[in-house]
Image (tube, rainbow, N blue to C red):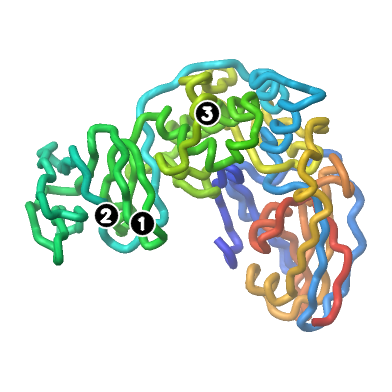
Amino acid sequence: MFGSWLVAARLGGDHMPYAVRLSTALGSLVLAAAGALTTVGAATADDPYAVPDSAVITIEGDGSGHGKGMSQYGAYGAARSPYLLSSQQILDFYYPGTRTGSTGGKVAVLISADDDGSLVVADRGGLTARSLANGRTVKLREPKAKRWRITPAGTRSEIAYKTRRWHTLTVLRGDAEIAAGGRPVALRTPDGTVSYRGALRSTHHAGDRVTVNVLPMEKYVAGVVPSEVAALRWPQQALRAQAVASRTYAAYERAHGGNAAYDLCDTAACQAYGGASAEFPSSDDAVRATARRVLTYQGELAFAQFSASNGGWTAAGQFPYLPAQEDPYEGSSSDYYGWTETVTSAAIEKAYHLENLTSLQIETRDGNGPRGGRVTTVRLQTEAGFDGTVTGDSFRRNLGLRSTLLEITGVAAG
């Protein structure tokens, strides 16, 4: 994603497509991804900053994430005294005009940490391996087995078990998956062991072998909610609002993703998912209380975006139910207000393939909220005469900033 002039990304907690626009003295070229930049009542440009060599740029801001749809900390505040809003009232505020619908079925989730070329699980009772090509199922029983593994073997999948060493049990046609009748299966990845419900599938996508967890939607949401928010201390009504938003987001991605291998990923690039290992009693209660509930708009699934904190004002999204509006429930976490970050001129140059950045300016804002509103475009100029703009979302993502409710407060030589 970094260093590309045309960037498109989907992020669950943070998942809107965005575009980068270039303008030069020789003309202008617009490179647009779906959901291009929208400005509302753009504010006056900030003063430009001269950028010396090896500069360090200080940036201050509010909020965390894109700010569209539900604020997780806003939901937290809304569910507490003095507001005590219900989950439905919270959802009605953040997604005005939506209605309640129902969904079910299964969802397929990329397990991004399992990237070492094979799928390895701990031995347990009831394990089976199944071919995705012809449905052939093999019971995985071996008294001395400690682990089981699926390894691609050309167009087939080798099923093996480990005692002191690996032994081949059988070879199945096509890709394959391992399951234990819905009970959790412990997947061993380079980052550690995590348990997942449903089936763990070793399949291929874009020329690579990937691990995909295929499981019922409700079991999936049970692993999402405590991965997205602090289930131990979050009010129940906020947890329920998160369950509905997460279920809706997953259902929307499943319906619109167009990816044959999986529906969405397990990181904040989609929405965080920790499998059965993440499940927690209070969030389990919230999932059960909202079972199958999703948000719809004019009969279609809503794109239920959410982020950690909107900084006191939501950002406008691509649909009518994602308006820009003041949020009275925000501000419950000081961690997301008045933050300060530093970036270097070298980081900006690397992100945008520039040399010798000489000027940096917040050119336009949307005019909504603190600090004059969210940054919508940033102007960059170089010693060689380049003069162009990038979107505020691009600037935030490429430089690892928390939100676009930001301002530049200083530029100094490094």
Residue type at mark 3: give it: Thr
Q: Earlier in the sequence, mark 3 or mark 2?
A: 2
Q: Circles 3 and 2: CB distance less than 8 Å? A: no
Q: Circles 1 and 2: CB distance less than 8 Å? A: yes
User: Which of pointers 3 and 1 indicates the residue nearer the eye?
Assistant: 1
Residue type at mark 2: give it: Leu
Residue 248's label in the rendered image is 3
In 3D space, how far apart are the residues under numbered discs 1 and 2 (Cα atoms)? 7 Å
In this rendering, position of residue 199 left or right of residue 414: left
Q: On screen, 52 above or below 179? A: below
Q: Residue 253: x percent and y percent?
A: 47, 36
Q: Residue 248: x percent and y percent?
A: 52, 28
Q: Residue 410: x percent and y percent?
A: 88, 69
At mark 1, the secondary structure is loop
Residue type at mark 1: give it: Asp
- Closest to the observer, 358 or 408: 408
Report crowding for label 1: few under 14, some 14 to 19, many 20 or more residues within 10 A (C-alpha). many
In this rendering, position of residue 336 left or right of residue 256: right
In this rendering, position of residue 178 left or right of residue 105: left
Residue 245, picture quadrant: top right
Residue 106, picture quadrant: top left
Residue 119's label in the rendered image is 2
Q: On screen, 176 above or below 216? A: below
Residue sitting at x 82%, y 67%: 58
Q: On screen, 196 above or below 23? A: above
Q: On screen, 145 above or below 313? A: below
Question: Circle 1 sits on which residue?
Answer: 114
